[in-house]
Image (cartoon, rainbow, N blue to C red):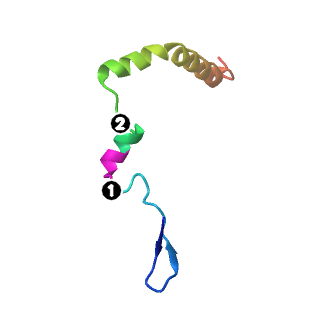
Amino acid sequence: MSETTHDGTVAVSAPAPPDEGLTAAELAAKYGLTVSGARPSLVEYVRQLWARRHFILAFSRAKLTAQYSQAKL
């Protein structure tokens, strides 16, 4: 945008950003943001836990194996 001032010079002003005037909550909703660190519901937590059960089992076995691999009777 440009405007002519009273002395004949042209003043250039930047257009307003599209997000100007929005609150933080409105901006978050607009861009699909969620609260960082928000805990899932119990049902969702159990679903995630079940989906990761193979990793949990493999990790715990590997950790125990590494921990006791040098153990002597």
Which mark lies nearer to you, 1 or 2?
Answer: 1
Vertical position of residue 6 compared to residue 53: above or below: below
In percent of width and height, residue 42 lies at 30, 22
Residue at 49% across, 14% down: 53
In percent of width and height, residue 14 lies at 49, 65
Residue at 36% across, 47% down: 27
Judge whether residue 36 can be spotted in this image: no
Q: Is residue 23 magenta?
A: yes
In the image, farthest residue toward the bottom: 7
Q: Is residue 48 left or right of residue 41?
A: right
Q: Which residue is mark 2?
A: 38
Tag 2: residue type?
Answer: Ala
Q: Which residues are magenta?
A: 21-27
In percent of width and height, residue 31 lies at 42, 40
Which sits in the foreground, 11 or 53?
Answer: 11
Which sits in the foreground, 15 or 26?
Answer: 15
Task: Name the secondary structure under disc 1.
Answer: loop
Judge whether residue 28 can be spotted in this image: yes
Q: Is residue 4 magenta?
A: no
Vertical position of residue 51 compared to residue 37: above or below: above
Q: Is residue 53 left or right of residue 58?
A: left
Q: Is residue 11 left or right of residue 21?
A: right
Q: Which residue is mark 1?
A: 21
Tag 1: residue type?
Answer: Gly
